[in-house]
Amino acid sequence: MNNSISRRNFIKTTGSFVAASAIGFPSIIIPKNKEKLGVALVGLGSYSRGRLAPGLQMTEHCELKGIVTGSPEKIPDWQERYNIPDGNVYNYENMHELADNDEIDIVYVVVPTGLHAKYSIIAAEAGKHVWCEKPMAKTVEECQAIIDAANKNRVSLSIGYRLHHEPNTQSVIRFGREKTYGAVTNVTSVASYDGYHEDGNWRKSAELGGGALYDMGVYPINAIRYSTGMEPVAVNGRQYVVRKDVYREVDEISDFELEFSNGMICQGRTGFGESMNYLSVEATKGWYYLKPMSSYSGVQGTVSDGTELPEDPGHQQARQMDGEALAIKESRSPIVPAEEGINDVRIVQAIMKSSKSGRSRIVL
Ligand code: NAD
């Protein structure tokens, strides 16, 4: 019985929730026949406010229906701006009650990294599909706990790697997969911003998953993985701090190498104290790059044969959320599955271990 047939039959007979198997994903719950799935944002910080909530005003397959916040002073503005009823406003203590709210189908976890596992698991236990921001969590064990909770509760789980939905990034992934310019022989990627974080900012806290490597380092790590289409077999790295009065617990800069089974060694770098953003790929019959490669807009590049990869005018986060919502509606596996998150976190942890042991080679 294929998915579309089982889905139609179940919806016809139950008109409600149904479990169906999906290729590559153990099983997911198909929501009622809604045109737009309801999304609740957990954490109303700068990313939710600046990108996700505006993006959810442009989406066809999902819409902003609820909020979870620990900051009551934010509630009136969000309710008014996005027409959110009292019944769809939650705090971190009562968010498990989302289980009783049919208007919410998807919970999008947008809190500090060290809290992703806690709230993603609560969302999955409430029977809601989970979108979890990058990096997926602080440790592989936490990532696995989220995956286990999603599987146990038969909900879909996707990681907020918006670039997988970005057209030029998709071209780079395709070039590697189809060997359009030959086999990939080297990749270099840097994602860093020249920033400063005030005291109290979670990006300075080791416990909350701060530091450049967790925050920005997953972009070059993920980029090296998607450009090569391969998983590294070993890593080495160095983490350090330039502004020692600012970053007392976490790295300000991390540079690293990912080693592959064919002997290729790719370079990555990330940091808070410098502004650089690119992905450069060399292949046997040419080269291509994206610069910038991970900004919210303006991702663009050039190929050695003169092909331009011009900026896409679309809204990245709207495209991401629509793509993932449609995948849920059609009972398909997520476009960016949990493996993307856990594999990057495994590499992050190995780079941290390498740095602590004098840049030793860590086998993955
Ligand atoms: P932020 O500091 O602006 O917001 C964090 C939110 O979490 C705030 O609303 C804060 O009140 C809330 N929060 C809940 N518990 C907290 C606690 N114990 N300590 C501190 N804050 C707490 O951060 P942000 O930039 O919105 O980032 C949030 C998440 O989104 C992070 O995981 C980050 O990596 C991710 N992010 C992703 C992208 C992307 O392009 N995919 C971009 C920015 C941020």
Image: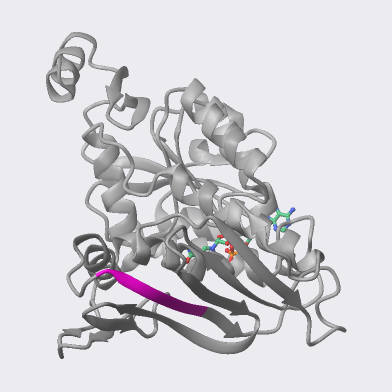
Residue 75 appears in the figure? no
At 43% from the left edge and 83% from the top edge, which residue is drawn? 278
Nearer to us in this view, 167 or 63: 167
Which residue in the rendered view is the most extreme toward the top? 13
Ligand 1 location (quadrant): bottom right
User: Residue 304: x, y in percent?
Assistant: 21, 88
Residue 337 covered by magenta stretch: no
Q: Name which residue lies at 81% across and 64% down.
A: 357
Q: Which quadrant of the view contains residue 3?
A: top left
Q: Which residue is drawn at 23% across and 33% down?
A: 34
Q: Position of residue 199 (x, y in %)?
A: 81, 74
Check the image and report above or below for 140 versus 15.
below
Task: Specify the quadrant that holds the N terminus.
Answer: top left
**Is 231 left or right of 29, judged from the image as shown?**
right
**Span shown in magenta:** 183-190
Front-most of residues 337 and 53: 337
Q: Quadrant of residue 354?
A: bottom right
The one of 3 and 17 positioned closer to us in this rendering: 3
Please indicate whether residue 119 sits to the left or right of residue 359 in the image: left
